[in-house]
Image: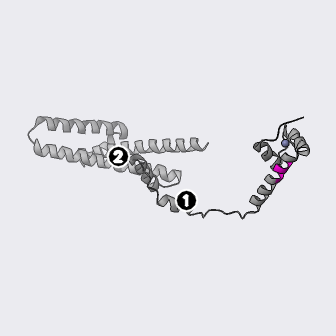
Amino acid sequence: MNHRHLLPNEIDLLVDGEAGFGVAPLRAHVTECDECRARLDDARIVVDALENLPHFAPDSRMADRIMAQVPVFVPAHVAARDSVTRWLPQSRPARAAAAVIGTSIAGLLTVAMVWLASRGDAAIFATSLLADRVQSLVMGTARDLALSLFGESAVAAVQASGALGVTLLVLLFLGTAVGTVLGLRRLATASSRRA
Ligand SMILES: [Zn+2]
């Protein structure tokens, strides 16, 4: 037989009506010990009183009201990512489309900057052989790329609008390709995260 009095956590077990291994000796002690029975009765009175208290729930807007007054430090990269996420469409095909469009626009901007730079170079180094050679190298590479990607007829058609048109077309194509790859990767990661 157990000859020591019950510990507070053992009285909690009895109050909660636990029926595990080891509770039976505690119960046996309570039936024999007046002191522990009195403590158990007191604990039951307290628990019943607590149970009968009205159950309050916090206002659903409480967290928002509190957080509105809490200065939260957001790192720049997190803020940038959040604002990008806010502007991105929610559905996955729309996101892929947005990625393609965004990359195409970025590609067009790059083309515009390259064109402006080459124009600036031409103005400053009008007589410089280097500027001409760099420019012809860029245009030649762009033309070769366009040839391998689109074939002779497409290049011939675009050549009417000059080498700049070829460069534009190639970079637009590259931008779209990169955008498609990024969009597909986003789709893959999104679906694998969901799986
Ligand atoms: Zn006792």
Residue found at the far left of this picture: 127
- Name the mark on residue 172: 2
Q: How far apart are marks 2 and 1 (CA)?
A: 48 Å
Q: Identify the residue shown where x is 40% and y is 46%.
A: 77
Quadrant location of the N terminus in the rendered image: top right
Q: Main secondary structure of the magenta part?
A: helix
Quadrant location of the C terminus in the rendered image: top right
Task: Look at the image and say whether residue 39 sits in the magenta stretch.
Answer: yes
Residue 134, percent across and down?
19, 36
Q: In this view, does 168 lie above or below 148?
A: below
Q: In which quarter of the image is residue 44?
A: bottom right
Amino acid type, callout 1: Ala
Q: Mark 1 points at which residue?
A: 63
- State which tag comes first along the sequence, 2 or 1: 1
- Magenta range: 37-41
Q: Identify the residue shown where x is 84% and y is 50%.
A: 38
Query: Who is closer to the viewer here, 160 or 57?
Result: 57
Task: Look at the image and say whether residue 48 sits in the magenta stretch.
Answer: no
